[in-house]
Image (cartoon, helix red, strand yellow):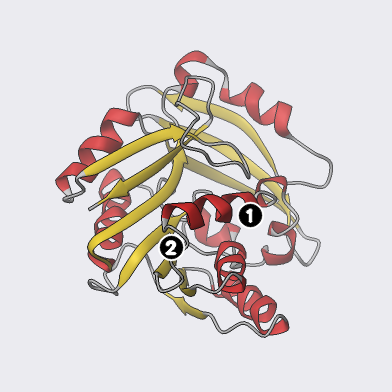
Amino acid sequence: MKQWYEELFENYAEKYDKEVFTRGTVGECDFIEREVNYDKTAKILDIGCGTGRHSIELSKRGYAVTGIDLSESQLQRARLKASGQSLKIDFQKHDARAPHFSNAFDLAIMLCEGGFSLMETDEMNFQILQNAARALKDNGKLIFTTLNGLFPLFHSVNEFYESEQKEGQSQCKGCSFDLMTFRDYNTVVLEDDSGRKRELKCNERYYVPSEITWLLKTLGYKKIDIFGSKLGAFSRNDALTTKDFEMLVVAEK
C-alpha cells in the first residue's frame, strides 16, 4: 500500500509548480550561493528535488547539481523543464531513506519538506538525515527546512493553513496536532494534473530545535545553526521564533 506522500506526487507536477510555496526559488538559491561562497566547483545534491526548481536555478547559475526524488512523475517534469532550458542536470529516482552516495558532494539541500519530516516514523526521517550526511564530503554542508515544533505549541495549525489558502491551490484541513508525537494529522484536498479532485489523509512530523541539533550532532556535524525560514528570503539574520512555521537549518561537518 502506498503512503500518502507517494500518492500525493503521482500526478501533481504541473499543479505543484503553481503552488504559492514554490515561488521563493530565486531568493532561496541566492542564500545557497552565499553559503557555498559562490564556488562554482561545488557539487550539489538536491534531496527530494521534486520538479527540480532549485536544481534548475542552481544549474543556470553554473553549479553541477544531482537531483533525487521518489516520484517519477515529478522527475519527468524536472527533466522536461531542464531540457527546455538546455541544462544538463542529473535527475535520478531514489528513495532518500536508502544510501546511494558516499563522500561525493560539497553541499546537500532538502527544501520545502521534500522528504525529511514526511516519513511515517522517526526512524525513517533519521535515515534521510543519515544518508544526506553519508553523501557529503568531509567538510560538506547540509541546508534544509523542516516544520518548527515550537509553532503549534503557541498557534493553531488549522488557523495557519486557513490564512494561507488561495483559490486553485491545494488545501490542508482538519489538522490535529499530537503533543505526544509532535505529529500533525490532516487531510489534503487537491486537484491533480488531470483535473481529478483528491483527498489524502496525511501526517507530518514537527521538530523542535534541540531535537534537530541532537540528531545532527550524532551524525558528526560540528556546527549547527537554526534560523526562521522565510519563503524566498532565507537569511542568517532571522532568529527562529515561535511564530515561524518552518525552520531553516545549516549544518557543517
Residue 219 in percent (x, y) is at 18, 50
Q: Compared with residue 51, is residue 190 higher up or lower down, i.e. above or below?
A: above
Q: Residues within 10 Å of mark 1 (few under 14, many from 20)?
A: some
| Residue type (three-letter) at the residue carrying disc 2 | Ile
Q: Please state which of residues 44 and 126 is positioned toward the viewer in this rendering.
A: 44
Q: Residue at x 34, y 37 (%)?
A: 225
Q: Please state which of residues 239 and 192 is positioned toward the viewer in this rendering.
A: 239
Residue 159 in percent (x, y) is at 65, 22
Residue 167 in percent (x, y) is at 84, 41
Q: Mark 1 or mark 2: name the one nearer the start of the chain.
A: 1
Residue position for label 2: 47
Residue 21 in percent (x, y) is at 66, 46
Element type where label 1 sits in the image: helix
Q: Residue at x 21, y 36 (%)?
A: 214
Q: Residues within 10 Å of mark 2 (few under 14, many from 20)?
A: many
Q: Please state which of residues 248 and 37 is positioned toward the viewer in this rendering.
A: 37
Instruction: Give the CA separation, mark 1 to mark 2.
Output: 15 Å
Furthest toward the right, the residue is: 167
Q: Compared with residue 196, is residue 94 higher up or lower down, i.e. above or below?
A: below
